[in-house]
Amino acid sequence: MEETSNKSITWNDLFSHWRWFFEDHQFPLKMGFTEIPVSPPMGDQIGKNIVDWWPTAKLAERRDFLTREFAFWGWDRQRKGTLHTAELLYACRDDPEQQAAVLIGASAWDKIQALPASWRGETLKLLKEILVAVCHSPEGPFKQRGLEVWHHAMRGTLPVNIVDRDLGECVRIKSYEDFVQLAAIEATLATLAWTPVILNPTP
């Protein structure tokens, strides 16, 4: 694709390309959550709307286990960054545009936190511009909705990150369009391999 111009990247630029990509490939634009009823033992209390990511391959197994025993906290839950992303996605569950902002922002965050050596310079500058447009600009979705950005110490904000340091050496993004497509592919893979779930106590 063409190099990004000197024009500032806006959220409208990013979301327009995101929406085109999902519609062109006939992917669902909105990410849904699978509700899991939880029956805690007598006297135990849990909060409502507890979000998590479960491996899709183990979804039925974990759901069945919860019908027999209340012990899901014994599983290794995802890192705080990934859980925060799930919480943001759930907060925006009725708004595909806001969910897109969370997924694009998470992908950019991960790349900056574990930057391949060949992505320094112009590529890093592009990533930071995208993150500003999504999370820090007054016109961006995070500021407009009052969403909390990931803490600086958080890593792994998505369960799937296809650009590791090795792949980054042979793949480089040159425009915001390139990055949006990369983030869209990651989001699609993440929701194939992992299922966002919402855990709620039953009466």
Image (spheres, helix red, strand yellow):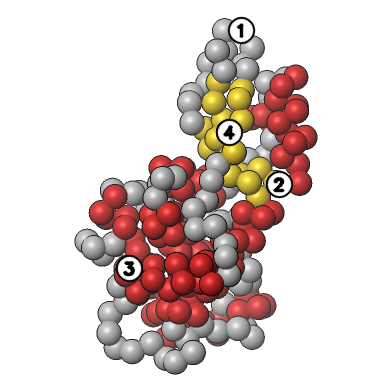
Q: What residue type is labelled 4?
A: Glu
Question: How far is the residue under mark 2 from the one under mark 3?
Answer: 31 Å
| Position in image of residue 114 (x %, y %) | 54, 68
Describe the element under mark 4 as helix, strand or loop: strand
Which residue lies under the disc numbered 3? 11
Above or below, comparing residue 75 to residue 185 in the picture: above
Q: As displayed, is residue 98 above or below residue 83?
A: below
Which residue type does callout 3 highlight?
Answer: Trp
Q: Is residue 130 above or below residue 87?
A: below
Q: Name the residue under label 4.
A: 35
For mark 2, does the 10 Å Cα neighbourhood hold few (<14), some (14 to 19), or many (20 or more) residues? some
Could you classify mark 1 by the number of other residues whose Cα lies within 10 Å: few (under 14), some (14-19), or many (20 or more)? few
Which sits earlier in the primary sequence, circle 3 or circle 1? 3
Where is mark 2, residue-wise?
56
Circle 3 sits in a helix, a strand or a loop, which is it? Answer: helix
Q: What residue does disc 1 label?
A: 42
Q: Residue at x 63, y 46 (%)?
A: 195
**Mark 1 / mark 4, whichever is N-terminal:** 4
Specify the amino acid type for callout 2.
Thr
> Which residue is farthest bottom?
2
Q: Quadrant of the C terminus?
A: top right
Q: Can residue 112 be seen in this view?
A: no
- How far is mark 1 from mark 4, CA to CA? 21 Å
Instruction: Name which of mark 2 and mark 3 comes first in the sequence.
Output: 3
Tell which circle, 4 or 2, labels the residue nearer the N-terminal end.
4
